[in-house]
Image (cartoon, coloured by chain):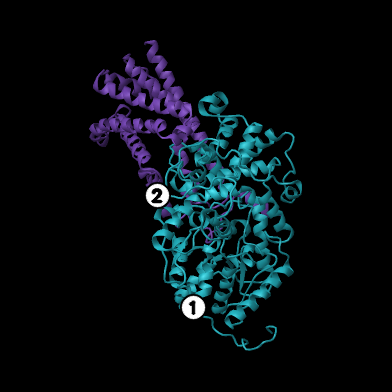
Amino acid sequence: MAKATFKVPVLSQYPQLPPVTPGSMAHSAPFRSKPEFQAPLGFPGELVENWQQRAIEKMGELLGRYRSLRVYLDACVKCGACTDKCHYFLGTQDPKNMPVGRQDLMRKVYRRYFTPAGRLFPKLVGAEDLTKEVLDEWYGYFHQCSQCRRCSVFCPCGIDTAEISMAAREIMDAIGVGQKYCNEIIAKVYKVGNNLGLPGPALVNTLEGLEEDVFDDTGVRVRYPIDQVGAEILFVTPSADFFAEPHVDGLIGYGKVMHESGLSWTFSTLASEAANFGLFIGSYENMRRVAMRIREAAIQLKVKRIVFGECGHAWRVGYSFLNSLAGPWDFLDPRYPVPQHICEFTWDLIQQGRLTLDKSQNDDKVLTFHDSCNVARASRMGDTAGGQFEIPRAIIRATCNHFFDMDEETIRDRTFCCGGGGGLLTDDLIELRVKGAKPRMEALNNVIQEKGVTHMVAICAICKSQFTKVLPFYGMEMDQVISLHQLVSNAIVLTPRYDDADDGDGA
Amino acid sequence: MSFLTELYAYVFYGAALVFVSGLTYKVVQYTLAPAPLKVPTTPAPTTRGGVVLRMTREVVLFESLFRGNKWTWMFGWLFHFGLFLVTLRHLRYFLNPVPAFIEFIQPFGVYAGFAMMIGLLGLWARRFLVDRVRYISAPADHLMLGLLLLIGASGLLIHFLVHTDIVAVKTFIVGLYRFDFSPLPTDPVLLLHLALVAGLMIIFPYSKLLHAPGLFFSPTRNQVDNPRERRHLAAWASRLERP
């Protein structure tokens, strides 16, 4: 079991509602960004002099830009329906981690500066000045929200705390108070092209290595092409897929599916990253700039289609926002949606009977499936509402013999966040990440005990990294989380290629 | 003409003005603020008609709240549905002649008054009994419930115990349409009931009662899930596309 300097929550068979414990996570705050990471994003390097005035101005600007923010700051009736829905509250008991508690950190400032009631009777309506203390509280607690939208499912007015925490982060960035993890990564995307800072030649090397591994393993020359002009499909995937475990096993699976499809495809060094952390910091401009690389790559490589790999928030940006941010996509093949999720792609092939799958190859595992929050509640797959739940499960059922869902209240649109989404997947927030994983760990533990589940399938790079890290804190093994396309990869029966017998360099 | 009649007449003109102009201002503000990104909470309807259905379920049945918390849903729905019937019932004091439908629901409107009170008491109890809800309750949240309870209680009192000359009340109200002030009965409970209702109208556009129009503008509920089929672009965002 991993060592912790804090108290790891105890898992129970039936979820229990924790008593409110004010201030229990008041100490939690991620590392601050540095001037060199702020500048490339267009933010001031450090706290500006007239920060209070600038913050209020920025808030006013965002209120005019986002209807969601404007309506959500007004509409909350404090009914309490959201109070027991956030995994961070359930794991930490801190009432400021209740969605409404978190929203109120901004709402009290909004009321003070933007509503007559808050100007005249601040105490009565809970309005407060934006002081240094309030700013610190913002920094701490708006970085304890993974923007998973679970609260928005249950709110009678549809209030989405993610919209508010994104706005808060944008306001803080505008006055020079950025978060290191997100902003350093976005700066890296601008400079190198992906979150992990992998330069083009390193990617080319990695993919060549993978081709050899797969050939050694299967005797079939599966290609993992990059920067191939004229390919049919541009494949955009989170950079963790190129080498992190268990991500890379999923990437191997993508290649095998592409191989069987017979279509030409390519990665791109320019768009070697599906992730778009511009979402997490609420910055439309940065999100757009990151997304535009995909458009440029598509034009440069003259592709006809775009397919996304397994990544939760990237799929939100891909499915829900890409058309707004980087469209229109009228130069691509209109017969296919832009972009397509690899699960949609794989499921299409399965339905057409074009994949030969040997389920028994996964007989050493009993599986369950973790719905990633951004896929579940902020996007879709396929033609019908809810396809994002059915298609991954259909692929799992087609590739293995033993599959059990976790408790209904913890899956589909009620799924619990892994605890590391929304730009919180950083070691300086490890206590938050472990505690926030509790509801998911509890549901997982129950199917392990009751159904003998051995592995949890995920379709998100952040989920995979987060679970790999936190599973050991709960007495489980880090390799119990696997990629969905790892299952596909195991089960797929490859069609030999004409040049498989060659031992040359793949000419 | 008594001072009280005149006072109440002007208070109601003022309250109506604040209510209508304040609400119009907010609705215009909500309408003008763009929603630059597609953010429906999914699974979401893929057609406009589907969205109308989803919104109807939210408004009429409080679908999301039902999934969220059964107690709050029960009390909240009792209160709102009660208030809705009571309001319909009250139309007979405003319309001449009284439509048959309004005649028909008169007795139900009275029961609805009790349902509304039970709902409010249940919701208020939660603010004391559930530690999470206690934590998020500001003084204004308690006052709002107190105000609504007092309005309901005074109304029921007038109906059952301390009757007023309801015909005179109607003459007063209908007279307000023509700036013709007929004498308002001076029963204290009636005066309290009317004063509180005027107060409610005045605070409506400046309080959390904005959840009523707000729900219709909530992007997580009112957007169609079709971002890949149709390009969604806000005016301010399209300006970023110009070099």
**CA gap, disc 2 to disc 1?**
41 Å
Q: Residues within 10 Å of mark 2 (few under 14, many from 20)?
A: few
Query: Closest to the observer: A407 or A187?
Result: A407
Farthest residue, direction top: B2
Q: Which chain is cyan?
A: A
Residue under disc 2 on the same chain as residue under disc 1? yes
Task: Read off the chain for label 1.
Answer: A
Colour purple maps to chain: B
Report the residue marked by disc 1: A355
Percent position of residue B72, x then y: 37, 39
- Report whether residue B239 is seen: no
The answer, for residue A375, to whether it is visible in the render is: yes
What amino acid type should be assigned to the residue bearing mark 1?
Answer: Leu
List x then y, in percent, for residue B176.
38, 22
Q: Chain of mark 2?
A: A
Tally the marks.
2
Whether A254 is drawn above or below B198: the answer is below
Dividing the image into 4 quarters, which one contains the N terminus of chain A?
Answer: bottom right
Q: Mark 2: which secondary structure?
A: loop
The quarter of the picture where the C terminus of chain A appears is bottom right
Callout 2, which amino acid? Tyr
> SS class of the residue under badge 1?
loop
